[in-house]
Image: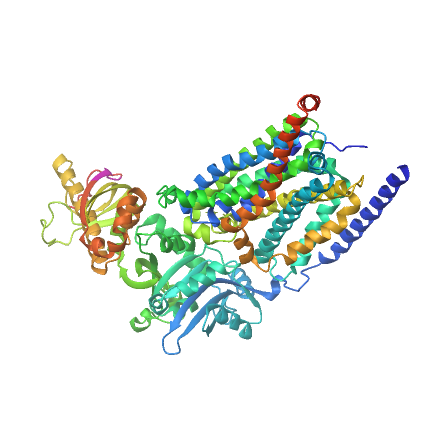
Amino acid sequence: MKGGGEAIKRRGVYLYSLVLCCLLLSLLASAGCWDRREPSFLGVVTAVAFDYDPQTELLQVIAEVANPLGISAGEGGGQNGGGGGAEMPFWVVETSGHTIYEAIKKTEQISTRKLIWSHLEVVLFSEAMAKRGLRPVLDYIDRERQARLIARPFVVQGDIRKLMGAEFPLEQLGGTALIRQLLTLRLEDAVVPEIDSLRRLFHHLSVPGVELLLPCIEVEVGKEEGGGGGGGDEGKTRRPGPAKISGAALFRGDKLAGFFDEKETAGYLWLTNNIRRLTMVFPPPGEGGDGENKDNKFLTVEVFWAANKLQQEVQGEKVRVHLFVQAEARLQDYGGQDLSQAEEFKRSLNRRLATVIHNQIGMAWRKARFLNLDVFGFGHELYKTRPQDWRRLEKKWAGIFPEIELEVDVRTLIRSYGLVAKPITVR
Amino acid sequence: MFQEKIASRQLFNIFFIMRTTIVISILPVLTVAQARQDAWLVAIITFFTSAVFVYLIGRLALNFPDKNIVQYSRELLGNWPGGLLSLLFLGLFLLMGATDLRIYGEVLRTIFLPETPLVVILGSMVIVAIMVVYAGLEPLGRMTDLIFPVFTLAVLFTLFFPIVETDFGNLLPVLYGGWRPVLFASLTPTAIAVQYANLAILVPSVVEPRETLRAALNSLLWASIILVLAAVIVIAVLGADEGAHAFFPVFKMVRAVRISEFLERFEFFPTFAWGLGLFITLAVNLYSLSKGLSQLCSFKDHRPFLLPLAVILGTLALQGYNDSLEIRNFFQPQIIAPALFFVFLFPVIVLWIAYFLKRRKNSVALPEDERRG
């Protein structure tokens, strides 16, 4: 027994020696990656655009790869990175293929570095790609281990290649620039839908009773060329931002079916309780009457709090939706002659604000009804709260949705009038 | 002969870690059937059904507090039939160890190390498990004391960080598909509760055998709470469909969440928890397997069996499944439930019947034995 114990002890010593040797050997690997995938051999993709060429029937991938040489030169030389003969902070590479993966693999034939996609921040779809259907792209992203669902999707109206190659005035990389632009916009105004990640996109596509919509980017590069922006340094400092984020692209399933403009998007956000801040401009009460505003005077109101409540009634195959909207706002500027402090004037101001909100909701509702796209998720709400009704109506929803009676009740309150009670008196 | 002992606290740690590891890997309540947003309900039902399993095996083991299943099945059924019956349990340990190991290998291969040969990933985990089992059950128990807080914290962080992105409306409507898919989906997590078969080997090694059943049921309760939380949060973040399509839903959720503009990519929490959890799961199954086999072959020590069994287990993990689709298929209720219920319930029921028959036969002697134990 004792001999057996010693044998075990001896074996233990051997085992520990073996482990120690293994640990020491593992130190060799700490000098770098065993397969030479050093950071200097990798190209980090920050933005990618997907396009479709109907003539060749090929999917096209346009990737923006961060260029460390250009970025460090830009940082050294101030914010005017990429100017003159300096290195650009990014490189745009374009390939095509029958599948997304084939196109992506082809980038390796023309790139000196292996592209990595784990830092992808923005995913752009051209109109052609969106019309053909997002499914092939989405399947690749969902399956691929590097891409993450935190990237932000957009539909691009205009030349997507010009956008990918554009320099953003205050930023070095297009991907980072678009994200900052979107974040600022979402904090300050309500002109883009709330679907701001691929995760939300996937969720919208997979749940019943709601159609997808995505934020839109209008390409502004090239627009200024005809207008003559001036050359040299002045032209450079006065160049406009290459992208304008506003509006929404509406999908039927995964295929593009139409667009919402800014006001329609705001209407959509009112309907879906996603208003954070919204700037609204309308004529002041008593100036030019309700009809035309002859003196062209306007006031600006900024909504800073909003909430809504949606109630649905189902009778047979008839659905009625009651929407109660509440909004609080502050007066930001006032173009009228006199700002009365009378209660009636304030009520009139609130009524005008409510009418503008009402109109925005109406515009969004009419467009969605015309396109027969339940982007507001009325069907989904029914599925969640009245599953028995939804089970009955699901198959006929395409016929029921445009016939929905929408009743909107808006209550507004302008809470703040700024630092002065009356506008300046000009003698 | 020197008998290694662990505390009932350590037994709780072992089973809590084993059960929760499966939760954070494949989230079976959501992925195996059509329960969709009712997966949390499946998790609740599973607690009660699994508790029956735990009670059956735990109570049986307590009737023989100083013997393991190989010994008492021989006592109840005779040398050969008892030995053959306990072989079913040993097969179960082998299958569970190999399957859990392969799932771990798949996640590492799919997400982190696509080009590393699977044998390297599985082999390194098997080597660590061999080391701790070789050291014995007591070091394994102390290891769980060390791992438990780290594991639990990692799991909690995994589940609580994504709360900022939750939409609990995704959990509606409740029971849209009725009870049928919910009950069907609960078969798989219940079948996975056969992990508690390890009780049949571990009970004689617990310092306070009477506390064993309580510790095991407690571990099931807490693991079930984690399971409910995981199901709720995954559905609230990803939605029922996206969660159900994923091979590893908790992982997918963590990768899809941006807590703020500067805090994202925190999948090291589940990876950490998973690695530690799998280490314990594998080590316990390997211990039970080698201990049981050594008893069957009338060896005093389980260590000589360790290396060959580890090789067999590793090979089974490597060769048992061709790909992750096959693993997912194995966890389908119609496949896993009959297989595991047979391997687990058949021996347990036969042993219970034999126990009652024997007790009736020796109605005077046996209760005394019981009381003494």
Please give the range of residues in magenta: A412-418
Counting labels gives 0
Q: Nearer the viewer, residue B180 or A347?
A: B180
Percent x, y of residue B95? 63, 49
Lateral position of residue A222 relative to residue B277, left or right: left
What residue lies at 65% left-to-right and 47% top-to-bottom? B97
State the scheme by which the image is colored: rainbow
Q: Nearer the viewer, residue B151 or A250?
A: B151
Percent x, y of residue A405? 17, 49
Rendered position, B189 above or below A106: above
Where's the N terminus of chain A, which quadrant? top right
Rendering quarter of residue A132: bottom left
User: Looking at the magenta stretch, what is its main secondary structure?
Assistant: strand
What residue lies at 53% left-to-right and 54% top-to-bottom? B328
Residue A415 covered by magenta stretch? yes
Rendering quarter of residue A170: bottom left
Percent x, y of residue B6? 71, 32
Residue A382 covered by magenta stretch? no
Rendered position, B252 above or below A327: below
Q: Nearer the viewer, residue B289 or B215?
A: B289
Let me know if residue A277 appears in the view.
no
Which residue is the extreme one toward the bottom? A55
Q: Nearer the viewer, residue A77 or A35?
A: A35
Rendering quarter of residue B57: top right
Which residue is the extreme one toward the front? B361
Percent x, y of residue A231? 37, 72
Let me know if residue B234 appears in the view.
yes
